[in-house]
Structures are given as C-alpha cells and as structure tokens.
Image (cartoon, rainbow, N blue to C red):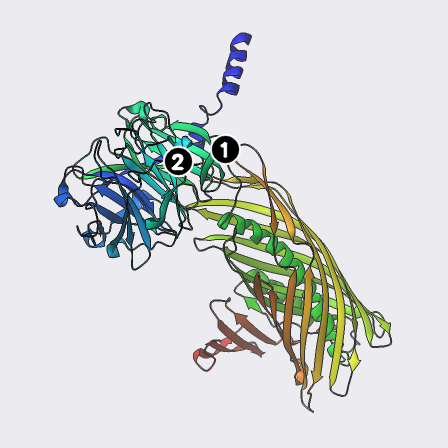
Amino acid sequence: MSLIKKILIIFFLLFPISNSFASMVTHIDDQTFQDGGSGSSILTGIEFNSDGTKMFTVYSSASGNDNGIDFINEYDLSTPFDISTHTYAGDSERCNLANGWSAAAYDQKPDNTGDMVFSSNGMHIFVIERGTNGSNDDALWRYDLTKPFDVSTCSLVQEKDPDQTGVEINGWRSGSIGTNTVKHFAQGVAISPDGTKIFISFNGAGSGDASGKSGIREYSLSTPYDISTLAHVDSAGILLPNSAPSSNPDAITLSADGKKIFIVYHGTNASDAIVEQYSLSSPYDTTDFNLDGALNLNDLVPDRSLKQGRAIAFSAKGFKMFVSDDQSQDASTETMYEFDLACPFNLFAGKCNAITEGDRIGMAEAQIEIAKRTIDQSTDTALNRLKWIRRNKDKQNLTNLNINFNFNNQRLASLTEVVRTSAVKKKEKDKDEKRDIFYWSEGSVAIGRVGDTSISSTKEINTNRITVGADRFIDNKALRGLAFSVGRNNVDVGNVGSKVDADTYNLTYYSTSPMKDDEKFVDTIIGIGKIHSDILTVLDGKELTANRRGKQIFGTIKIKDEIKGDKFTLIPSGRFDIGHTLLDDYEEVGVGGIIVEKQHVRTKNLRAALAMVEDISNDKYTIKRHGKIEYRADIDRSSDFKYKYKAGSGTFTDTLHVGALHNITGELGIDIVFPENYSIFIIYERDQAIDYGHTDNLHIALGYLPNKNTNFAIQLEGINNTESNYVFSKNINDFILDFKLSNDLMNPTEYQEAAINLTGKF
C-alpha cells in the first residue's frame, strides 16, 4: 500500500496539468446557430462587440449556397457573453460579404470565407479567404462600417494577397517559403488593437515551397488598418509540426494584452479537437514564444464527440472561451461551445497572468479610494466644526444641530434623531442653567469621478455622511470635542455593474488651542475607524462577490493665523495629515474569483491654504461668507494589492498608485444664524486631482435646537434623485399639526406635493 501511495504522489507531481483541466476550463453550454442561408454552410469565425451584447458569426458557403455569397450574421445576447440568450437579428442585419465587390477592383469575390476579426473601435472587419488546396485564391479582405459593430453597413474596401506570390518569405520560425509557391490555405486572422500588426494562420496542405509549412505568420502595417501596406515580418512567426492536428490550424485569437495567442485545430477525429496556447515574451510579437500546452476539448465534452474545431473567441475580460464545431456540416445549423475559465485568457494551471487592466484594477483602486476619502472626510468634518466655532465664537450657544438630515439612508437618519432628542432633553433639564457643552451635527455629500486610465476603468464615487459631536471650552479660548460619524460610500466601477458599497464608522477627537493671543491657533485631530465593504465584480457577465473589513487610525495637525480687518479676516494655514488603514483579506465567491491578502493603505498629505471670511451681518441675521484655496501634496499614494486566483498558483503583487501628487481645492461657503436658534451652514468644495480626477463635496448643517412640541425635518433623496422634503410638526394639546412640502431641487419652483394634516394623539 505504501508503494502505491508513493507512485500516486509522483504521478500527480509529474502531471499536474492533465489533472487541472476541470478546474481551469469548464464546459458551460453549447448552442446551435442558424446560418440564414439556403444550403450547407460552415461557421468559421466568432466575434463579439465590446460589451458582449452582440455576437457575430461568419458563415462560409461550403456548398455554394446563396449563389456562393458568404455572410456575417448578427445575434443579440440578452445577457452579455451568454450564448444561451442569443436571438438572431435577422437577414436585414447581416453583412453580405459581396457588398462593395466588383470584378474590376478585386481579383475574386469573397468566397470560402475563414476567420474574421474586428478592429478595436468596431469600424473595420478583416476577413480571411481560404484558398482551396492547389488554388491561387488566398486573400485578406477589409470591410468598413458606418457605425461601430453595425455589420449591416459593411462595405468591401480593400483586398490583399497575404502570401505575396513571387516574393521569398524567409522567417525561419514560420517556415521559409521560396518563390515557387502555390497558396496554402489561409484560415485564421488576428490583429493588434492599434492596427499595426496582423497575424494569419496557414494550413500546410498546399503545394510547392509551401507544402508542410503550417504555422502563424506575422505581418506589419505601416499605416494602421491599411492592408495595402501589409509586409511580412521575416524574423517572426510560429512554425507548427507537420503532423495531425498541427498540420491544420484554423482560427486564431489573441489575449487582451497581446501576450498570448490561441490556435484551434480542425481535425478528423475526437483526438484532434485541440486548442493550443502560446505565451509571447513581448505583446503582439511572435519573435519569442513558448507553448503553454494543448487542451483536448473532448476531455471537457466527452459525450459530444467534438472533433472539427473551426472558430475561437474569448469574452472581453477573458473569462469565457467559445469554440465552434462543424463536424456535421448541417444544412442549417452549427454548434458553438461555451467554456468558463478559472483565470482570464488561460487554459492551464500555473499559467495565470497578473491583473493588468480594466474593472479588476478599478475595483482594487476603489477600495483604496474609500479608505483615503474616509479619513479625509472625517478630518475635514471636525475641522469644519472648529472653523464654525471660530466664526461664531461670540455666540452664547454654539450648539448647531442637524435637522434630521437624511440621505435616503435610515441608519444616518436614526443617528441624527438620537442626538437631537438627547439635546432636547438636556435643554429641558438645563434651560435655566449655563450650558458649557455644545452639540452639533453635519451632513455631507461627496460626488467624485476618476476617468479611465491606461490600466483602470472609470470610477463614479458617491458618499453620504452624517456626523454628530459634542464639545466644550476648557478655558476662554481652547476647545475639546468628540465626533462620531457614519458614512455610506458607493463606488461604481466601469459600466457593467461592478461596484463597492462600504459602510464606515469613525470616532474623532479634536481640539484647538491658541498659540498667541486670539490670532494664532493649532488644531489637532486623532481618530479611529472601521470599514465594512460589500464587493461585487462583474466580469464577462459573471458576478463575483466578497466582503471585506478594515481598521483605521489617523491624525492631523494644523497651524493657522488670523489676520483681521474690519469686515474681512484672512487665514493662512499649514497642515499635515497621516493615517493608516489595514484592510483584511477576502475571497471572491464565483468562478474566476481571486483570494486577496491583507492590504496596507497609507495616508500622508502636506497642505498649504489661504482662507477668507467676510462678515456681512445685519441687525436681524448673522451672515458670514467664506472661501478657501488650498494646495495638497499627496506624498504616499502607493499600496500593494496582493492576490492569487482560486484555481491558479502563485501570488501576484500589483503596486497601485491612487490619486495625484498635486491637488488643488477650492471652497465656498456661507453661515447664516437666524433669530430663535436657527442656523444654516453650507460649504461647497471642489477637489481637483491634477491629471487624475475630481471630487465635489457638499457639507450642510441646518441647525435648530427644538423643544419637545416642535419638530422640523429636511430630507434629500440621494444624489441622482434630487427630491427634497420639508416637514414641520407641532403638538397642540395632543393634536398633531403636520405641514409637508415636496419638490425637486433641480426645479425649485415646481412643487410636487404640499399637504396639511391634523391628527389626534390618544
């Protein structure tokens, strides 16, 4: 028994790939597709639009159907990259490959069509024509569209001979071909996103110098997408063995980063249903390559006898692979197989690549953004309170309570209500006593946007926050206080539904002390916090979910000077922020998920600002306008994001840089104190990160210290929905008089609802 165990262990160590197919590649579905023609046809090419809501197939007129005309058909997918949801768009939406052809302009009409590929902008289609054995009609065709991915608008504009008859091709990797050549079955085509490289697969079934020279050839285009400038790259290419199934390579495709190329082979039996994966040392360059492995599709669909692979394609993010099979050459249908991959653009264990772009990076950056913004907002809210105290320090009562300010979030509303009720009770209890503890609250809205970068998708950031606090003077000028805030952060990443929703909780100690007289002050802040995040990543239509927790500690020191005039006060200041967030590890649920290690996010900011306060009070109202311009240097923007794929091996580290080194913040605000304890405090702030993105912040405090018989409420229903509600409620001898007014803030003169209700309280 011991000997058998040792043998089994050695077997699994020596042959890890053969026992990893099931975990790395999984058969999900297969569907048949109507060709729309009148005779036998072959599905030779598959492509998708950018978001996977449309799929396109090339049908080759194998038996001369439709007068020998080939078509590109269009299918609508109700779920992106899910072929089970396909609907044929109809004959009016397909591309007639003879559209634009004329015998005078081109050598022959497109026929016996092979593989196809779209340009990255969806405005060009490149189609390969397969020369039959011994014929002279291999061709590369270009079609232009008037609208992206609208194949019904296709028109043939260019033709090119990819074999360059009469020109010796010397690339040893792709098999040298002399001038004595007969075309040899061009079948697959792929193109780089910038349109400067084209790759074509050839079957070595031709005659002359081409015989037995199966492989992939690389071509350059001196003018992007202009195939008239096609030139063979002699030093590149992949020469395949002259044996089954390698003697018959069909469609090819590239990974999104250009560092992997895939070949599907067209065989004659089940053992030939092969997809090969090659890794390239440099993107879109076949000069140096390595064979990662060969996957037999019948290992995944053993009951289907899949053997004549033709077309191959991947979803946009590479988590799905699609392969067609034409073994039956049915007169009306072809079969397409859909496979899930454990990591993008990879079929084999140990060959997963690091995350390089798009929504994945955007999701990782979003978590860093939330951590940094939470610290900034907690600090800024405490500083706003100190600034308000400075501007209104001559008042007897410095309580400034938020009036049930609710951002469509019951948790925030209930927090405000608890503090407001406590303040009312204290007022009732201490109404004849001097009050030395002041209560306050502030509601804030932050809307931010970070556009596309070379590696990351767009991030739309929406933050609602309520802060409640209490403070007191310890002498005539120094003040100490505590604040507790609850925030809701929503970050939408990309445009397919990926998002991070995070609840944040922060406790902040703040103080201000005079350094000299009543003009120079030092403000200090120390805080701790927690982050609870729900993570939803949508990749190629698949949802991956996870939860993540985090802990924070942060501090700020600010030194400022007040230069006072009759009506104006100038306030220069300098500030240093430091903080640290520890984000816990987590594991995504779903195929293609990743396991993320603990992550450290650091905050270090140096700031210099100049603020101004103008007193425009009158006999009835205390009014102060204020503004600020601030420069911020974010001197610690990097964070290591460490992860591995659940079904893969090896840990990857992406060092992400979030934010910009140089940031400019502009601020405008106003304070209004009304008779009988009303107050309004509003600040609008634009934080512009140079060459990165921006955030708009709105801080609002609507203050009133109510009595037990009167309640006021103001409600904002989110950011996108700008409906507001104002409610006044008065208890008169156990009868409740309610007045409600509703309107849209975008249309302030149009009221949707105005109501007065009188109800009895028993």
- Residue type (three-letter) at the residue carrying disc 1: Lys
Can residue 652 be seen by looking at this rendering?
yes
Which residue has dot 1 on it? 351
Which residue has dot 2 on it? 262
Residue 9, position as x, y percentages in the image: 53, 16
Disc 1 on helix, strand or loop?
A: loop
Q: Quadrant of residue 440?
A: bottom right
Can residue 703 be seen by looking at this rendering?
no
Residue 463, position as x, y percentages in the image: 57, 62
Circles 1 and 2 in contact, beta carbons < 8 Å: no
Query: In front: 677, or 646?
Result: 646
At a point 77% along the width and 85% down the height, the residue shown is 565
Compared across the picture, whether 289 is left or right of 72 comes to: right
Q: Quadrant of the image for the C terminus? A: bottom right
The numbered mark, 1 or 2, whose residue comes first in the sequence reads 2
Residue 360, position as x, y percentages in the image: 51, 47
Mark pair 1, 2: CA separation: 14 Å
> How many discs appear?
2
Q: Residues within 10 Å of mark 1 (few under 14, many from 20)?
A: some
Query: In front: 655, or 443?
Result: 655
Query: In front: 409, or 572?
Result: 572
Query: In front: 664, or 280?
Result: 280
Compared across the picture, whether 331 is left or right of 130 comes to: left
Tag shown at residue 320: none
Disc 2 on helix, strand or loop?
A: strand
Compared across the picture, whether 370 is left or right of 593 comes to: right
